[in-house]
Image (cartoon, rainbow, N blue to C red):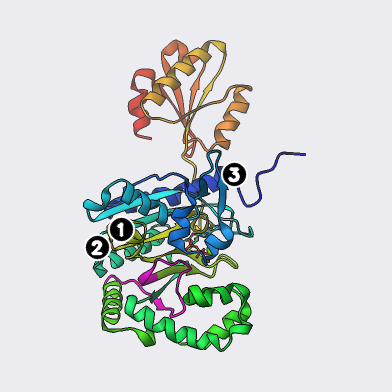
Amino acid sequence: MKPQPIRGTRDIFGEDMRSFQHVVNTARSIGLRFGFEEIATPIIEFTQTFKRTLGDTSDIVSKEMYSFEDRGGEGITLRPEFTAGVARAFISGGMTQNLPCKLFSTGPLFRYERPQKGRYRQFHQVNFELMGPKEVEADIEVISLAAMLLDALGIASKTELELNSLGDDESRAAYRDALVAYLSKYKNDLSEDSKQRLERNPMRILDSKDETDKKITADAPTLDEYYNDTTKAFFADLQNGLTALGIRYRINPKLVRGLDYYCHTAFEFTTQDLGSQNAVLAGGRYDKLIGMMGGTETPAVGFGGGIERMALLLDTIPAAPRPIASVHIGEEAEREAQKLAYHLRSEGFTIDIAYNGNPGKRMKRANKINAIATLILGEDELKSGSVTVKQMDLGTEEKVATGTLLDWLGRV
Ligand code: ATP
Ligand code: MG
């Protein structure tokens, strides 16, 4: 029996790794243009960090966390999302005095889910958090960053931006009462999870994937009927700002996001191209979170994007970089070829040396690895202090003096 990885985890290599890296590098570079600095928080945090912020009734906390007691008896959890840990770091690291604070993160997250295409137990996100501004400009900026990322990856046309406003505290409180009044009529028909949520977080029932719950919530009152003037103005400004940037969206009044800490803006870029998974990238505004965690209350907005899901949507797998192959003929040339490769590598070129096989086999390998050029070093070349350079796409060969090789290669 071959050893197997744990269910829901994958080894990422080859083409998958190239797609994966392409997503991460693109996100990081676009983040830089928006002024985001990278932060790496620990993969483990105190369980409380997630429990208190995500809420006991969230799917993540109630069903999906990898939690354990460490040898010292501390309750520890493998991070299931980035926001709580980044907010914790923002408070612990004393960043609250230096606003706005823009933080980019990437790395693995863990959720105990039913694995399928695009849904894993260890998955990865690129994550952006912008802390400080209460102004809607921040929401516009963060959503435009997400749109630019999808565009740069060439997958924007496969996604749709869904937008909602969860309103301010007053709007949400008014809505909550109306929603509870409506749902209470169907209390006995709700799923067990939703019965629990009815008391503690009724809005989350709108997020339920249970079929009966969905039927019941189809006719539930919607939040927009309870927006006050502040909420209306904020949401209108957001929409105008996005429109001015040419970013299209669809308002989805049912989009509530599964977590406790959101207010005002909630958004998701969704797709129809990933089978039963449709969320690609999701986020929103969370003005209360940092205060809830014991920091100075600081408004914030952010999002997380699933790297695997974005990678799956890519039309083409990014090509591997093309190396320069080195083929030597005869024992004497071997040492010379090593020296030359070392020199060229130190100058920044990627050199592939075939370790064994006759010259014909080595040339075959040069083709297989899609070399851009092959350096041929045999007796003749050794004698004349030169290298034969074959340009693989043109098929042309040329003898180049070793002293001018660097210059020559720079032009290939
Ligand atoms: P879903 O509804 O698909 O479970 P979610 O609402 O739980 O998604 P978020 O917590 O908002 O997801 O995470 C943001 C993004 O992370 C998602 O849009 C998705 O791209 C990705 N993601 C979430 N869970 C997984 C998973 N188990 N495997 C792969 N990617 C995931
Ligand atoms: Mg989920």
Seen from the viewer's position, the closer of residues 347 and 305 is: 305
Q: Amino acid at mark 2?
A: Pro
Q: Is 150 in the magenta?
A: no
Q: Residue 347 appears at what percent x and percent y? A: 36, 26
Identity of the residue furthest to the front in this view = 73
Seen from the viewer's position, the closer of residues 381 and 83 is: 83
**Residue contact at pointers 1 and 2, CB within 8 angstroms:** yes
**Residue contact at pointers 1 and 3, CB within 8 angstroms:** no
Q: Quadrant of the N terminus?
A: top right
Q: Residue at x 42, y 18 (%)?
A: 386
In the picture provided, is 96 more to the left or to the right than 360?
left
Q: Residue 384 appears at what percent x and percent y? A: 42, 13
Provide the residue designation for mark 2.
133
Seen from the viewer's position, the closer of residues 234 and 329 is: 234
Residue at mark 2 to residue at mark 3: CA–CA distance: 39 Å
Give the mark, 1 or 3, whose residue is nearer the N terminus. 3
Give the mark, 2 or 3, whose residue is nearer the N terminus. 3
Q: Amino acid at mark 1?
A: Leu
Q: Residue 124 appears at what percent x and percent y? A: 50, 51
Residue span colored magenta = 245-266
| Depicted 253 relative to depicted 307: above or below | below
Q: Amino acid at mark 3?
A: Asp
Q: Residue 332 appears at what percent x and percent y? A: 53, 10
Q: Main secondary structure of the magenta part?
A: loop
| Depicted 115 relative to depicted 393: above or below | below
The label nearer to you, 1 versus 3, is 1
Q: Residue at x 32, y 60 (%)?
A: 291
Residues packed near mark 3 inside 10 Å, few (<14), some (14 to 19) or many (20 plus): few
Residue at mark 1 to residue at mark 3: CA–CA distance: 32 Å
Residues packed near mark 1 inside 10 Å, few (<14), some (14 to 19) or many (20 plus): many
Q: Which mark is residue 11?
A: 3
Q: Which mark is residue 130?
A: 1
